[in-house]
Amino acid sequence: HQLMLAKNQKGYENLSKLCSLGFIDGLYGKFPRIDKELILQYHEGLIATSCCIGAEIPQAIIKGDVEGAETKLKWWIDLLGDDFYIELQRHRGLENIDQSGVSQEDVNQILLGFAKKYNIKVIATNDAHYIEEEDWKPHDALLCINTGSILAEEKRFKFPSSDFYFKTQEQMSAIFSDVPEAIDNT
């Protein structure tokens, strides 16, 4: 997982190039992939974030490798400087990620420490896999269809709560009331 945005025309051209190369040279199964060599080559005009808990920096934190997470973070800072942001998310049901004992809020607190240490702006985002909160049940059924499982299966791919919908600015402001700059920066 890696979020990258174009901040100008050159960034748009580079992002288009990276997307094309991901499909042409980096197809892994049905998913396009790019590596850091390509990002080094085509990073001008791009903005990136630390991303959701599935990304490399949060995953290192979840696995207890805070030093490794910081090393990965510094790679992005060295490459993008002020165009790299710490991304914070808060979803119900992520109190014990992958039975690691680490919560999403634990990850956020370490990320906030990195932001302070390196003077990185923070942003607040929400994983949105459906539009309205009540859409979580149909989304869950679609996940079952996609993975060949049934709703009654306990050990199947599913989201831990109905929190993965497109939240309003008011909802996000309430969730991140203790970090208002994350809302302002977003």
Image: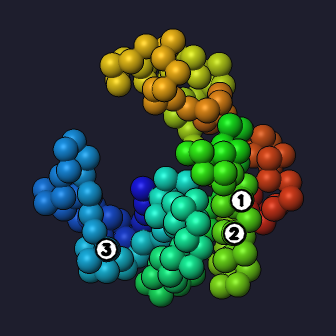
Quick one: SS at disc 3?
A: helix
Tell me whether the residue at label 2 lies in contact with that at label 1, contact meaning CB atoms closer than 8 angstroms: yes
The first of marks 2 and 3 along the sequence is 3
How many residues crowd mark 1 within 10 Å: few (<14), some (14–19), many (20+)?
some
The first of marks 3 and 1 along the sequence is 3
Q: Is residue 130 above or below residue 28?
A: above
The Cα atoms of the two marked residues, 3 and 1, are separated by: 27 Å
Quick one: SS at disc 1?
A: helix
Name which residue lies at 45% across and 82% down.
75
* Number of disc labels: 3
Q: Which residue is mark 3?
A: 36
Which label belongs to residue 110? 2
Type of the residue with mark 3: Lys
Q: Which residue is mark 1?
A: 106
The one nearer the camera, 98 or 8, is: 98
Q: Is residue 68 above or below residue 148?
A: below
